[in-house]
Image (tube, rainbow, N blue to C red):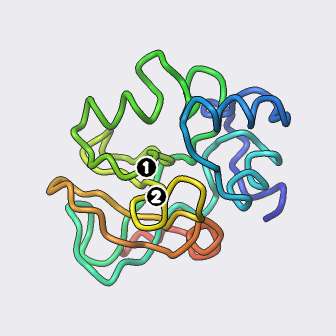
C-alpha cells in the first residue's frame, strides 16, 4: 500500500495513528485488528480510496457483479470504528441490524443498507478476520480471506458497471 491509495479528501480521516491509539481501539473493540489494516491506517487514518469497486461472484442490491465503497474507516475520532457517538462499528451494527460477526470497516454509497465488515466469527477475535459483504438480507458473504486481499482487489469503478 502506498501513500496515493486515498483521494485527497479528508472527511473520513481520523487522528494520527499511534501505538496507544491502536491499543485503546483494540481494547474497546475486543479484537486484534489485522496488521494490513493497521499498515494502511498508519499511512492515513481512514479515507476515500481511489479504487472503490470490488468484483463479486454474486449479485448484490448494488449491482449484478460488484460492490462499491465510499470510504475505509479508521480508528479514533468521530468516524472511527471504535467511536461511541453513533458512528462506530457497534452503533452501526445495532442501528442497521447487521449480523454481529465483527466490525464495520467501510462506508458505502447506500448509506447503511449494505456494508463491508471484518468477520471474526470463524476464527475468533485474535485471529485474522475475513472480509465480508452484508447486503439487505443481512447474510455475510465473503469478499476476501484477509483485509490485505480485499484492498489489493479494489478496482477503479467504470461507468459501464
Q: Is residue 42 above or below residue 10?
A: below
For the residue carrying disc 1, how many other residues have a C-alpha within 10 Å: few (<14), some (14-19), or many (20+)?
many
- Taking the spot 45% from the left edge, 25% from the top edge, the residue there is 87
- Taking the spot 54% from the left edge, 35% from the top edge, the residue there is 29
Instruction: Give the quarter of the figure containing the C terminus.
Output: bottom left
Q: Is residue 43 above or below residue 143?
A: above
> Mark 1 sits on what residue?
102
- Taking the spot 40% from the left edge, 32% from the top edge, the residue there is 90
Q: Tell me how far mark 2 sits from mark 1, CA to CA.
A: 5 Å
Q: Quadrant of residue 65?
A: bottom left
* Foreground of the two, 24 or 71: 24
* Foreground of the two, 158 or 46: 46
Q: Quadrant of residue 61?
A: bottom left
Q: Residue furthest left?
A: 137
Residue 51: give x, y in percent of width and height. 59, 64
Q: Quadrant of residue 81?
A: top right
Image position of 135 (left or right of 6): left
Residue 39: give x, y in percent of width and height. 79, 55
Instruction: Give the quarter of the figure containing the N terminus.
Output: bottom right
Dot placed on the residue nearer the N-terminal end, 2 or 1: 1
For the residue carrying disc 2, how many other residues have a C-alpha within 10 Å: few (<14), some (14-19), or many (20+)?
many
Q: Is residue 105 above or below residue 123?
A: above
Residue 11 visible somewhere in the drawing: yes
Q: Which mark is residue 120?
A: 2
**Label 1: element kind:** strand
Residue 22: give x, y in percent of width and height. 74, 37
Do the numbered discs 2 and 1 sit on residues whose CB atoms are within 8 Å? yes
Residue 142: give x, y in percent of width and height. 38, 72
- Taking the spot 51% from the left edge, 75% from the top edge, the residue there is 145
Image position of 45 (left or right of 66): right
Amino acid at each position: 500500500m502506498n501513500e496515493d491509495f486515498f483521494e485527497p479528501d479528508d472527511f473520513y480521516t481520523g487522528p494520527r495513528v499511534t501505538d496507544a491509539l491502536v491499543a485503546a481501539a483494540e481494547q474497546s473493540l475486543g479484537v486484534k485488528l489485522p496488521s494490513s489494516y493497521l499498515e494502511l491506517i498508519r499511512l492515513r487514518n481512514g479515507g476515500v480510496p481511489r479504487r472503490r469497486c470490488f468484483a463479486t461472484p454474486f449479485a448484490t442490491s448494488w449491482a449484478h457483479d460488484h460492490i462499491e465503497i465510499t470510504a475505509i474507516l479508521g480508528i479514533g475520532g468521530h468516524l472511527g470504528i471504535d467511536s461511541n457517538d453513533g458512528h462506530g462499528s457497534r452503533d452501526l451494527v445495532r442501528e442497521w441490524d447487521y449480523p454481529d460477526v465483527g466490525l464495520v470497516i467501510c462506508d458505502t454509497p447506500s448509506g447503511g443498507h449494505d456494508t463491508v465488515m471484518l468477520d471474526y466469527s470463524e476464527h475468533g477475535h485474535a485471529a485474522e478476520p475475513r472480509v465480508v459483504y452484508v447486503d439487505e438480507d443481512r447474510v455475510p458473504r465473503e469478499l476476501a480471506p484477509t483485509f490485505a486481499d480485499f484492498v489489493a482487489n479494489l478496482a477503479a469503478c467504470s461507468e459501464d458497471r
